[in-house]
């Protein structure tokens, strides 16, 4: 089914729940049982998988893929071309509690949400948990099943519980090979990268 949502035309399955004031970019698809909350903004050609959740006010750039049953809680912000694997969770509560010290139920006014920010081209492996607040750099890769508790540099390959850097990856997602001190090369594309204070940066040809 093709539906008008926000100011654009997108493909929304009948069983999906998309808020009337959410904005879906041209070519974006929302699959069965997914939920896109109020004020969420999704770029062009995004794919929201079955049962995925996009929180209120969450922003996605163009060409993002959020796989089945991933939970992207507000105020997360994703750049262009970000991949969120199946059952990934982006949290938003630093000190989670259902009740206050006096035993009364907590409401939305009792806490301030914090978000996960993900740079362009980054990928989060299946069933990983990203514990806000944190930033995952451009083209970084988080291994499946990881628990990310600290910022991840650009192009870093991290894995484990808690996640630690175990290497570097290029734009193609392949692990880079060190060609000289501080210089790294992609075995698939031959692109060269140089270490910087923020991670790696692609060298101009």
Image (tube, helix red, strand yellow):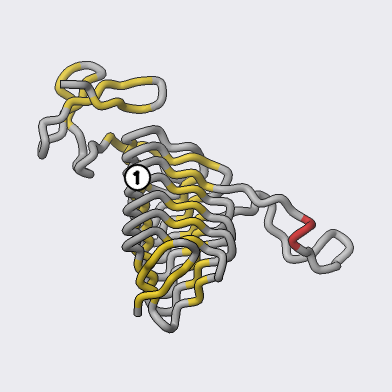
Say if 50 sits above or below 75 in the image: below
Question: Which residue matches tag 1?
Answer: 122
SS of the residue at dot 1? loop
Q: Which of 38 and 163 lies nearest the eye of the viewer?
A: 38
Say if 83 sits above or below 19 in the image: above
Which residue occupies 30% across, 21% down? 195
Query: x%, y% of residue 7?
Result: 47, 61
Residue 68 falls left or right of residue 5 = left
Residue 141 falls left or right of residue 94 = left
Residue 85 appears in the picture as rendered: yes
Query: x%, y% of residue 190?
Result: 11, 31
Question: Residue 45's quadrant in the figure?
Answer: bottom left
Crowd band around label 1 with a 10 angstrom C-alpha radius: few (<14), some (14–19), many (20+): many
Say if 43 sits above or below 193 in the image: below
Residue 86 appears in the picture as rendered: no
Query: x%, y% of residue 12?
Result: 39, 74
Which residue occupies 85% across, 67% down? 103
Q: Which of 92 and 15 lies nearest the eye of the viewer?
A: 15
Most distant residue in the top direction? 181
**Quadrant containing the N terminus in the rendered view:** bottom left
């Amino acid at each position: 089914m093709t539906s008008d949502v926000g100011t654009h035309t997108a493909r929304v399955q009948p069983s999906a729940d998309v808020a009337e004031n959410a904005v879906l970019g041209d070519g974006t698809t929302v699959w069965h049982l997914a939920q896109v909350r109020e004020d969420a903004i999704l770029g062009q050609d995004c794919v929201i998988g079955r049962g995925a959740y996009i929180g209120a006010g969450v922003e996605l750039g163009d060409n993002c893929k959020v796989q089945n049953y991933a939970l992207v809680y507000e105020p997360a912000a994703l750049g262009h071309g970000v991949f969120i694997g199946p059952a990934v969770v982006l949290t938003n509560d630093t000190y989670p509690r259902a009740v206050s010290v006096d035993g009364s139920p907590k409401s939305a006014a009792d806490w301030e949400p914090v978000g996960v920010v993900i740079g362009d081209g980054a990928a989060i492996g299946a069933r990983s948990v990203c514990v806000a607040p944190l930033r995952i750099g451009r083209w970084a890769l988080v291994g499946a099943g990881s628990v990310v508790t600290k910022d991840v540099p650009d192009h870093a390959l991290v894995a484990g519980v808690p996640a630690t850097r175990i290497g570097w990856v290029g734009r193609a997602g392949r692990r880079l090979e060190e060609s000289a001190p501080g210089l790294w090369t992609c075995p698939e594309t031959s692109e060269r990268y140089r270490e910087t204070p923020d991670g790696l940066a692609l060298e101009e040809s």
